[in-house]
Image: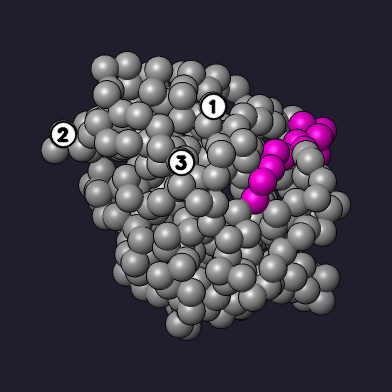
Amino acid sequence: MSEKKKERVLITGAAGFLGSHLCDKFIGEGFEVIGMDNLITGDMENIQHLFKNEDFEFYHHDVSKFVHVPGKLDYILHFASPASPIDYLQMPIQTLKVGSLGTHNLLGLAKAKKARMLIASTSEVYGDPLVNPQPEEYWGNVNPIGPRGVYDEAKRFQEAITMAYHTYHGLETRIVRIFNTYGPRMRINDGRALPAFFSQAILNKDITVFGDGSQTRSFCYVSDLIEGIFKLLFSDYSQPVNIGNPDEISILQAAKEVLEIVHNSTSQISFHGLPKDDPKVRRPDITKAKNVLDWTPLVDRKIGFSKTYTYFKEKLEK
């Protein structure tokens, strides 16, 4: 008897931090995976191990241009985008284009292939929130013309056009709002707090904390996030869902915890001016994820930080 044909999934941003972990997850679950990336922030090293797998293929392509994938497609996961302030401040136009033109191209592909599409939105759609924790019903407090606006508004538009395709064309869509995620394969120099803290501590440089460090974040380990995304894709829920860890800590506390893990570091904490429109609080309300997906984060921060330290230490020693 012939084996049942494997389902086929396209993952954009496949060579990035989250995209590469998603490729691993879907290969592990028995899917055929097509990875797509233009490599402006992605790293081929993240997916190098997959090239020997017959169920993985890679397209070097910018999704802001017309996207063609031959053959059937069952699912599309759109994770292509610069995702850290240092990236989208350097690449504002590309950030806006991948969230708008890129999403439009992929929605068209999903419609043509009758595929279900999941988009990677972000907690940044809430801006500098006036509500804490942030539920999905909160509309946000975003400065559309500020330095972070190119990312925030690209993602807000991405949600709007995805929902328009869902309601107008009847396309099966899913929207995940991702809160601060960390773990192996983050770029050392991507400008976000934890990669900066770990690399600075390992190299015995001053740890850079912006403002007085009282602003908060909620850090979710990557394996927890990937599991939440997988569950959302195969749920029947088409409204946005927050996926993140509601365990909220200050940036200063995060810096101190990193120093505890990198215990032989001689780094000191140094304080610098707060960037414009930097969110003062960030914490997901994950009631929907718990009720709809039966999902909750499992990895304790100390364990997650230890695994992340091991990864960065190996990278910096190469």
24 vs 174: above or below: above
Q: Nearer the viewer, residue 62 or 131?
A: 131
Density class for disc 3 (Cα within 10 Å; few <14, some 14-19, many ≥20) is some
* Residue indicated by mark 1: 253
Image location (x, y in percent) of residue 161: 71, 73
Amino acid under disc 3:
Phe
Give the residues drawn in magenta, as a range.
Answer: 279-292
Is residue 278 toward the left or the right of residue 196 in the image?
right
As measured in the structure, the alpha-carbon distance from the residue carrying label 3 to the one carrying label 1 is: 13 Å
* Residue indicated by mark 3: 271
Is residue 199 toward the left or the right of residue 114 in the image?
left
Residue 91 visible in the displayed image: yes
- Whether tag 3 and tag 1 are in contact, CB under 8 A, the answer is no
As measured in the structure, the alpha-carbon distance from the residue carrying label 2 to the one carrying label 3 is: 27 Å
Mark 3 or mark 1, which has the lower sequence index?
Answer: 1
Image location (x, y in percent) of residue 106: 56, 72
As measured in the structure, the alpha-carbon distance from the residue carrying label 1 to the one carrying label 2 is: 26 Å
Q: Mark 2 against mark 3, which lies toward the viewer?
A: 3
User: Any magenta on residue 147?
Assistant: no
* Residue indicated by mark 2: 317
Is residue 209 toward the left or the right of residue 48 in the image?
right
Amino acid under disc 1:
Gln
Which residue is pictured at 14% across the width and 38% down the height? 318
Q: Quadrant of residue 13?
A: bottom left
Question: Judging from the image, what secondary structure is the residue with disc 2 in?
Answer: helix
Instruction: Residue 231: give its label.
Output: none
117 vs 243: above or below: below
Amino acid under disc 2:
Glu
